[in-house]
Image (cartoon, helix red, strand yellow):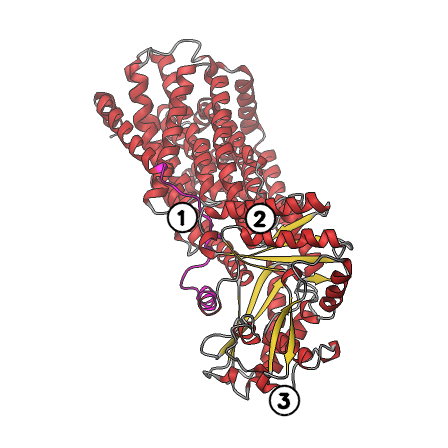
């Protein structure tokens, strides 16, 4: 079959190359339409209960992840010139297109009582046209006398002051988000320049925008870097510009096709699928090396160019196909998970890897047939003295130190298993951002001064329409206030904002602003305050108390929200916090009368991390199973199957052990390594065993001779491709994302160990396997 396919490609080389070029042009057009994703990774399935609760919350109360926060820390903010600059900063922020609302002490209002109209009306605390220090000091005293704003807009212990900037959610989910965030940054920098006060910026809008920008930038540089490194390695190996250009053409076309596939599947570029193009370069170059290595070695033996091309395709076609199939399986198994972000990555990467096989299968023999026959300089690399000496060393160890290889392998496995027991599973929202990055340091500033910025929402459903506007509402508010007090005591969480806090503000105002009256109104208070709390049509009172209250109540007056900002505590601590809140809510709220739900971006992050980790664990299982079936089909032997899997299981155990000993936690970005590395590392095994199987019959089934020849013949190309793969993955170590860095060095370690196990342990297993068969036959 494969010789016929080789002859077919050579016979119809011109039409095939034209078709390849046409498809590439079409894919290039689709590539120009690919967009960058500006949404958080959709890790949770749309039918997940937690995700549906989150959507229900947003439908009732709006988006919880569109608030960007700015903070300064100084004890000189209330100096006249500094405060004027602070007011100007607020004005500049309001002017930015896409900004819906700016909240800070500059826009703080006080509630005042009007006994004639029996209303509570709002009055700005600070006059925008403040002109004297005396005026400012007077307004400052009023502001500091309002507990409602304490710890929300300022921290009196640390002199930190906060500005909340609400951004339009449509803008946040579009490319216009970058301009909005940049303009906010410019306004903050202008304030810093005027006052010399450092500004700190954080919040989900900023984090999402910065991550999207980093993805775009890194994808470009990694693609350029992987192509540049591959070019250098190919030139060093082959010493031929034409050979290098052919190999680069294969991977460049593969990259274009991958973007086209991304567009055709309706996906956008995310942190995960942005890795596909540079990964294709890393995976595609070894395809070219194996094909070219076979072509050159055969030509040097026969001197027949056409027959060498036919042998190249017929001998390496099946090998390369199964290598690409197993590599594709390592990625495609992610498509079986319920996580959308993994599903997309698996589908695009899996299809792209198979496409690069088709491209190399057509392009290499077709183009090589047009080129002159290989020169001695182009095949000189086959006599690499250093690598040949190294392979003879390996061969010597395999034949003479079997017991030592077994013992060392066993010792490494035991040491690694001990490390696995030290593995921890924990993830953070900013897990993959370097600790020195301003995004990370600013987040920690907010956690220190305001207990964090990550949104957590609690929805209390009373199960009765209109109950929150009835006389029974006070019972609900007391329970919410008790829950809020419990939450405020948690060091990782800010003081909750809810209707009871607004009612406390109203009570303080009703009793002439005395801070001792900042308490939840009792039944007697509600009687005397009832008229003041009612909504009245007053065109001069646009920011009425009723408007503040309705922000935290749904239109049916049945459900109310408790809004909390919290620290990025990680997936280990977060369940403990949520469990404590759940226990408290169960104590306060009778489940027959109330439904209490915890939701928000913090909850969806936790649930998403669980789904990704569980999905990756499943993907490793499916990868092992599918790859094992491929090996069984290819070699038709259970013994060979076990011989092939053991050298590839050990590298995974070693990598997991290193993670445990070094302290790298199991999280979505690091669990990814195992199935990816397995899919790529098994390539070495397939190439070794196929060559072993092809040579075995020629050597009259003499296993010792066949093993030594296989090490010499296949070992060279295995070392070359391993160098390319390891070097290609090391590029990811220069990423600004911790997860991508981990993918780089952990996969490189796995591939290095896999190369050694396949060139040392696999031959030993084949020799032992043959001895056991001989003994069994003699018996």
Q: Position of residue 404 (x, y in %)?
A: 61, 34
Dot 1 or dot 2, earlier in sequence: 2
Quarter of the image with the C terminus is top left
The alpha-carbon separation of the residues under discs 3 and 1 comes to 60 Å
Mark 3 secondary-structure assignment: helix
Q: Residue at x 58, y 82 (%)?
A: 533
Q: Which mark is residue 184?
A: 2
Give the labeled residue for mark 1: 344
Nearest to the observer: residue 286 or residue 525: 525
Q: Is residue 637 visible?
A: no
Is 43 colored magenta in this rendering?
yes
Nearest to the observer: residue 214 or residue 541: 541
Mark 1 secondary-structure assignment: helix
Q: Quadrant of residue 679?
A: top left
Q: Position of residue 559 (x, y in %)?
A: 50, 77
Q: Is residue 18 visible?
A: yes
Compared to residue 725, the image places residue 151 above or below, namely below
């Amino acid at each position: 079959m494969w010789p016929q396919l080789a002859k077919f490609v050579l016979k119809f080389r011109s039409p095939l190359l034209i078709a390849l070029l046409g498809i590439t042009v079409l894919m290039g057009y689709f590539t120009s339409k690919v967009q960058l994703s500006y949404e958080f990774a959709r890790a949770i399935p749309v039918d997940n209960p937690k995700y549906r609760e989150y959507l229900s919350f947003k439908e009732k109360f709006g988006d919880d992840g569109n608030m960007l926060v700015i903070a300064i820390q100084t004890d000189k903010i209330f100096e006249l010139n500094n405060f004027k600059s602070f007011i100007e900063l607020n004005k500049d922020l309001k002017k930015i297109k896409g900004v819906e609302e700016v909240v800070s002490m500059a826009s703080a209002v006080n509630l005042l009582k009007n006994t004639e109209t029996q209303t509570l009306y709002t009055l700005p605390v600070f006059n925008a046209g403040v002109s004297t220090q005396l005026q400012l000091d007077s307004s400052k005293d009023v502001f500091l006398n309002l507990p409602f704003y304490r710890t929300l807009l300022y921290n009196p212990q640390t002199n930190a002051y906060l500005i909340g900037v609400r951004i339009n959610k449509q803008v946040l989910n579009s490319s216009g988000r970058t301009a909005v965030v940049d303009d906010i940054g410019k306004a903050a920098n202008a304030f810093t320049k005027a006052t010399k006060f450092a500004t700190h910026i954080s919040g989900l809008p900023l984090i999402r925008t910065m991550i999207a920008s980093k993805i775009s930038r890194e994808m470009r540089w990694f693609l350029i870097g992987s192509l540049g490194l591959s070019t250098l390695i190919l030139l060093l190996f082959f010493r031929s510009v034409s050979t290098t250009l052919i190999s680069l053409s294969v991977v460049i076309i593969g990259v274009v096709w991958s973007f086209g596939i991304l567009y055709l599947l309706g996906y956008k570029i995310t942190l995960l699928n942005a890795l596909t193009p540079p990964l294709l370069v890393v995976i595609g170059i070894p395809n070219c090396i194996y094909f070219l290595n076979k072509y050159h070695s055969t030509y040097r033996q026969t001197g027949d160019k056409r027959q060498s091309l036919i042998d190249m395709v017929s001998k390496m076609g099946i090998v390369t196909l199964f290598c690409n199939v197993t590599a594709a399986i390592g990625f495609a198994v992610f498509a079986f998970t319920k996580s959308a972000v993994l599903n997309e990555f698996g589908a695009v990467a899996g299809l792209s890897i198979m496409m690069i096989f088709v491209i190399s299968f057509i392009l290499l023999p077709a183009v090589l047939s047009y080129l002159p026959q290989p020169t001695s300089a182009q095949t000189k690399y086959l006599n690499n003295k250093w690598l040949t000496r190294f392979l003879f060393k390996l061969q010597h160890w395999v034949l003479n130190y079997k017991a030592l290889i077994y013992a060392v392998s066993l010792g490494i496995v035991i040491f690694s298993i001990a490390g696995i027991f030290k593995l921890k599973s924990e993830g953070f929202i900013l897990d993959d951002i370097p600790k020195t990055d301003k995004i990370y340091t600013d987040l920690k500033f907010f956690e220190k001064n305001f207990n964090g910025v990550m949104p957590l929402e609690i929805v209390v459903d009373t199960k009765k329409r209109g109950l929150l506007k009835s006389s029974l509402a006070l019972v609900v508010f007391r329970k919410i206030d008790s829950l809020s007090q419990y939450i405020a005591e948690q060091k990782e969480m800010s003081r909750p904002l809810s209707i009871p806090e607004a009612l406390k503000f109203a009570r303080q105002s009703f009793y002439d602003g005395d801070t001792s009256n900042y308490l939840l109104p009792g039944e007697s208070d509600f009687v005397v305050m009832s008229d003041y709390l009612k909504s009245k049509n007053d065109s001069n009172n646009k920011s009425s108390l009723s408007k503040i209250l309705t922000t935290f109540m749904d239109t049916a007056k049945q459900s109310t929200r408790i809004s909390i900002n919290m620290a990025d505590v990680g997936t280990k601590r977060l369940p403990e916090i949520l469990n404590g809140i759940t226990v408290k809510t169960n104590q306060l709220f009778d489940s027959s009368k109330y439904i209490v739900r915890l939701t928000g971006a913090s909850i969806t992050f936790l649930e998403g991390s669980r789904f990704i980790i569980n999905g990756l664990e499943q993907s490793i299982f499916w990868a092992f199973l599918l790859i094992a079936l491929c090996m069984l089909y290819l070699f038709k032997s259970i013994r060979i199957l076990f011989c092939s899997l053991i050298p590839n299981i050990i590298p995974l155990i070693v990598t997991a052990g290193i993670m445990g000993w070094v302290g790298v936690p199991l999280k979505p970005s690091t669990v990814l390594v195992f199935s990816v590395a397995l899919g790529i590392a098994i390539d070495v095994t397939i190439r070794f065993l196929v060559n072993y199987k092809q040579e075995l019959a020629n050597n009259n089934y003499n296993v010792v001779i066949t093993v030594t020849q296989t090490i010499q013949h296949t070992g060279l190309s295995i070392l070359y491709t391993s160098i390319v793969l390891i070097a290609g993955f090391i590029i990811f170590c220069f990423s600004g994302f911790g997860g991508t860095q981990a993918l780089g060095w952990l996969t490189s370690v796995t591939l290095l160990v896999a190369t050694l196990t396949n060139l040392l342990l696999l031959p030993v297993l084949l020799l032992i396997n043959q001895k056991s068969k001989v003994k069994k036959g003699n018996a």
